[in-house]
Amino acid sequence: SQTIHQWPATLVQPVGSPLSLECTVEGTSNPNLYWYRQAAGRGLQLLFYSVGIGQISSEVPQNLSASRPQDRQFILSSKKLLLSDSGFYLCAWSVVLASEQYFGPGTRLTVT
Amino acid sequence: DAKTTQPNSMESNEEEPVHLPCNHSTISGTDYIHWYRQLPSQGPEYVIHGLTSNVNNRMASLAIAEDRKSSTLILHRATLRDAAVYYCLISSGSARQLTFGSGTQLTVLP
């Protein structure tokens, strides 16, 4: 069966510090991968998606970036965090692009 | 992009059916209707999806209006574990149109 992992589960970082969140998927090949952010009490905002290694599409211009160095690994990064980057970051995968998505447990990021 | 409208909140009694509505009046002919739910501090969980015909699975049923401008997620017997935020979204197969709105907060009363 397929599983999706995210780490860390929680993170507190000062403004201006770098960020690296990792997501890995097991039990499937060539998944479509997604990064979402959820502000408190709000819906999910799609940040990036990837259909293959090295292929990244950005949906929202911001100081975040994403990379897919391996088939089942998706990384979200920032060189300098802003207060507005605080939120719940979710990684997801799907077999068919934009179809049934399976989400990871999420990373709660607090920028202080 | 096809947008969705859902009530902010709904209440149900335990072991009774729940009908969660979603309006999507700008849906296109090939757009799929997806439903997810999210428990507090967890990632969303896929529930069900459909195109034109009503769909059933072990979790729920999806009733789609004949004109496809609205749909209803049906939980046949609500349990306390069904208390969650339920999201309806429309997918055309393009990731650029993936939008989760604010959803409906379902409260299940014992």
Image (cartoon, coloured by chain):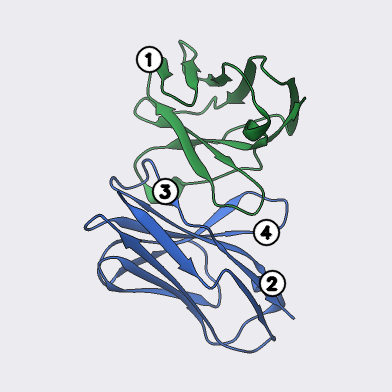
Chain colours: A blue, B green
The dot on residue A84 is 2
Q: Residue at coordinates 30% horizontally, 60% vertically from top-left?
A: A26
Label 3: which secondary element? strand
Q: Amino acid at mark 4?
A: Ala
Q: Are marks 2 and 4 in contact (CB under 8 Å)?
A: no
Comparing A105 with A95, the one in front is A105
Identify the residue under disc 1: B53
Q: Amino acid at mark 2?
A: Ser
Cα distance between the residues tagged 3 and 4: 19 Å
Cα distance between the residues tagged 2 and 4: 9 Å
Identify the residue under disc 3: A102
Pinpoint the chain carrying mark 1: B
Vertical placement of residue A79 versus A58, above or below = below
Mark 3 Cα within 10 Å, few/some/many (few <14, many 20+)? many
A46 relative to A67 in the view: left or right: right
Mark 2 Cα within 10 Å, few/some/many (few <14, many 20+)? few
Q: Have a look at marks 4 and 1 and say if they share a chain.
A: no
Label 1: which secondary element? loop
Identify the residue under disc 4: A39
